[in-house]
Image: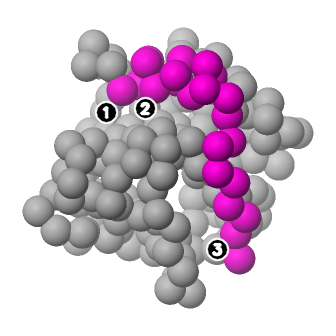
Amino acid sequence: MFKEIKDFLNKEDLLNIKNLYMNKEFSHWRLIEYQEGIEDQEFLMHDLYWNFNIVSPFWKTTLPLINKLNVNALVQARVNCMLKKDKHYRSSFHTDTPFECGTAIYYLNTTNGWTEFETGEKVKTEENKLIIFNSSQKHAAVHQTDEQKRYVININFF
């Protein structure tokens, strides 16, 4: 079960975040060869906050998002950039943390990719939409075939 909120941020906050991470000049990505299983597809990641610590000088850009979530304690936050594929590749179903907390996925742009839960439920990737769910729910990322890049911010929190 998940909660879906459309138009989560105001336009100014959304544009500030998009202008940073979707900018061709942003070069602070690391290549992740696979998410969970060897059949997963590669994607790019930028860690903002990891194991309760700030790890990026850009983390403040996401504060409007984190503040609106009303987070008590941030566990980790990262920006993922999935690259266009010739078909809808799905990552392995996984959880983001080995313990129970909250998970939020925020979509920066609209593509024909989606987030899929082990239950079969699918969430379309739509700009400025947020989904929140318990971190114990297994989910998977599905690559897009229409846009060159799919940007999401993934947050784990208490």
CA gap, disc 3 and disc 2: 23 Å
Instruction: Find out whether the residues at labels 1 and 2 contact each other: C-beta distance under 8 Å.
Output: yes
In front of the other: 44 or 17:
17
Residues packed near mark 2 inside 10 Å, few (<14), some (14 to 19) or many (20 plus):
many
Q: Which residue is mark 1?
A: 30
Instruction: Find out whether the residues at labels 1 and 3 contact each other: C-beta distance under 8 Å.
Output: no
Q: Position of residue 10 (x, y in %)?
A: 67, 29
Residues packed near mark 1 inside 10 Å, few (<14), some (14 to 19) or many (20 plus):
few
Task: Tell me, for residue 13, which label it has, or none.
Answer: none
Q: Position of residue 7 (x, y in %)?
A: 64, 43
Q: Position of residue 15 (x, y in %)?
A: 52, 22
Classify mark 2: helix, strand or loop.
Answer: strand
CA gap, disc 1 and disc 2: 6 Å
Region of the chain picked out in magenta, as a range = 1-22
Q: Amino acid at mark 2?
A: His
34 shown above or below 121: above
Residue 11 within the segment the image draws in magenta? yes
**In terms of sequence position, does the residue under pointer 1 or pointer 2 come before the other?**
1
In front of the other: 113 or 137:
113
